């Protein structure tokens, strides 16, 4: 998580530890994902992140929530993956990321249509 906050330029009053708060979490992919300049590598890492995302959240209160409270269940979404795809200008359609479980594709498509949040731009 520190890599993402550093990448985003977090200047907040709270210190962010180098050591992960949830050591088993899939956030370990963030430093390489954020630092890579190679599209295919960023796509591969984001796909791996999404693959590991749900099971890495076993310690959260909402894990398996769909089994306990079906009438209020609205899905599991990795919004941070959507933000990363948007900021890193990852082509979610070509890479197949849009179809991955837990990826908020509709939100990312909307943000892309609105030209929100690009950090890396594709050469024309």
Image (cartoon, grey):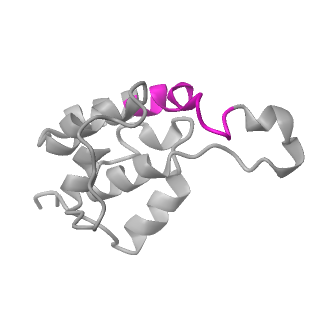
Residue for point 33% across, 73% down: 115
Image side of residue 44 versus residue 6, left or right: right
Whether 113 is drawn above or below 27: the answer is below
Expressed as whole percent of the image width and height from the top left, the position of residue 48 reads: 38, 27
At a point 25% along the width and 65% down the height, the residue shown is: 118
The quadrant of the rendering that contains the C terminus is bottom left
Query: What is the count of numbered marks?
Result: 0
Residue 15 relative to residue 67: left or right: left
**Residue depicted at x 30% and y 29%:** 44
- x and y percent of residue 6 in the render? 20, 54
Q: Tell me which corner region of the image, top left, top right, bottom left or bottom right, holds residue 66.
A: top right
Q: Position of residue 62 (x, y in %)?
A: 68, 40
Instruction: Using the rendered image of the protein, determine whether residue 56 is visible from the camera's viewpoint.
Output: yes
Residue 89 visible in the shown view: no
Q: Quadrant of residue 95?
A: top left
Q: Height in image: 33 above or below 122?
A: above
Relative to 54, is 68 on the left or the right? right
Residue 51 is a magenta residue: yes
In this view of the protein, which residue sits in the foreground, 124 or 104? 104
Farthest bottom residue?
A: 114
Query: Who's the residue at 33% across and 35% down the image?
Result: 20
Q: In the rendering, at what x and y percent does residue 96 appear? A: 42, 36
Q: Quadrant of the N terminus?
A: top left
Between 60 and 100, the residue placed more toward the observer is 60
Residue 73 is one of the magenta-drawn residues: no
Depth check, front residue: 74 or 64 = 64
Magenta stretch?
Answer: 49-63
């Amino acid at each position: 998580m520190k890599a993402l906050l550093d990448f985003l330029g977090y200047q907040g009053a709270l210190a962010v530890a180098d050591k992960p708060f949830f050591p088993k979490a899939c956030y370990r992919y963030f430093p390489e994902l954020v630092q890579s300049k190679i599209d295919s590598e960023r796509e591969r890492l984001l796909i791996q992140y999404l693959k590991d995302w749900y099971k890495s959240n076993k310690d959260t209160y909402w894990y398996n929530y769909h089994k306990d409270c079906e009438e209020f269940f609205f899905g599991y979404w990795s919004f941070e993956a959507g933000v990363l795809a948007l900021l890193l200008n990852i082509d979610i359609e070509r890479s197949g990321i849009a179809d991955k479980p837990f990826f908020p594709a509709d939100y990312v498509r909307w943000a892309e249509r609105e030209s929100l949040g690009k950090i890396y731009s594709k050469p024309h």
